[in-house]
Amino acid sequence: MQVYNNKPTAGLLKRIDMARKVKQAEYETRRTDILEAAQRLVYSKGYEQMSIQDILAELHISKGAFYHYFDSKQALLEALIERMANQVIQLLVPIVEDERLPAPEKLQRLFDAASRWKTDHKDVLLTLVRVWYTDKNAILRLKAESAVLPLIAPLLTTIVCQGVKEGVFHTGFPDQTSCIVFSILQSFGDALVPLILQHETDPEAFGRLETLSASHQEAVERILGAETGSLPLFDTRILREWFPFSNST
């Protein structure tokens, strides 16, 4: 009597695994296509003016295909913000890994690189933050901040640990201190956005930004146990580009 072995062979398992990887790669490729199309449309039309139909027309896909990847325009916004955050992170890693730089300089270059990237993309970012910082997106912002923290905290922790070894930072809790530094930076960003959005009708906004920058720099220096004035983290020359209508020079 013939006995059949119902267990899958190694070859079959390998083909199944390969098919799964191909399917996942196709999924990621199509999702990236949608995000890139959305980002182009945000540049050309603005987020609020962009419709899902615009994306469908741009990529020649069906509405069902779009909703397979994003269940709403809101979900698309969240993914765009996350994508941009990852783009910034990729710029920061080489700075943190540069063994030639002392910790304070690494921290300053980290901020300069992030600020420069945002300034270089300010046209699209301005269209996004007008939506991102509305009350209805408050919960979404908190979720996004929670998602970004695990990406940026290890970079900050590496710098803090280096600074402790160099004797320029003084903390016994580098991991927790890095999270607090991130919170301070997030607070700075949250306070900066209204100044940027209001400065067309408030030419003194840039002057208040200088106070905002100084106070947050002092907070970071104190939490790190650094010397006062040793961490000029907020480059007003870069930030000035966000305030073309300001009276300040």
Image (cartoon, rainbow, N blue to C red):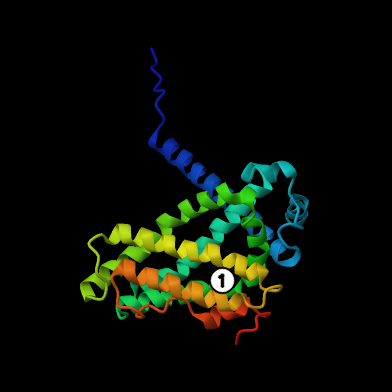
- Give the residue type at disc 1: Lys
Spot the residue most to the bottom. Answer: 249
Disc 1 secondary structure class: helix
Q: Nearer the viewer, residue 206 or 235?
A: 206
State whether residue 101 is above or below residue 19: below
Spot the residue most to the top. Answer: 1
In the picture, residue 241 is in which quadrant? bottom right
User: Can the viewer see residue 29 in this picture?
Assistant: no
State whether residue 126 is above or below residue 7: below
Can you identify the residue that label 1 sits on?
118
Report x, y in % for residue 126: 65, 66
Q: Tell me what residue is drawn at x 41 percent, y 73 percent.
A: 217
Report x, y in % for residue 85: 52, 61
Q: Nearer the viewer, residue 242 or 212?
A: 212
Using residue 100 as the reference point, say whether residue 145 is left or right of it: right
Q: Nearer the viewer, residue 51 or 207?
A: 207
Q: Quadrant of the N terminus?
A: top left
Q: Tell me what residue is drawn at x 30 percent, y 79 percent.
A: 102
Using residue 104 as the reference point, say whether residue 73 is left or right of it: right
User: Can the viewer see residue 23 in this picture?
Assistant: yes
Report x, y in % for residue 9: 40, 33
Q: Tell me what residue is drawn at x 55 percent, y 52 percent.
A: 141
Using residue 206 as the reference point, say whether residue 64 is left or right of it: right
In the picture, residue 232 is in which quadrant? bottom left
Q: Quadrant of the C terminus?
A: bottom right
Report x, y in % for residue 33: 64, 56
**How many discs appear?**
1
State whether residue 229 is above or below residue 96: below
Q: Residues within 10 Å of mark 1 (few under 14, many from 20)?
A: some
Q: Tell me what residue is drawn at x 67 percent, y 43 percent.
A: 67
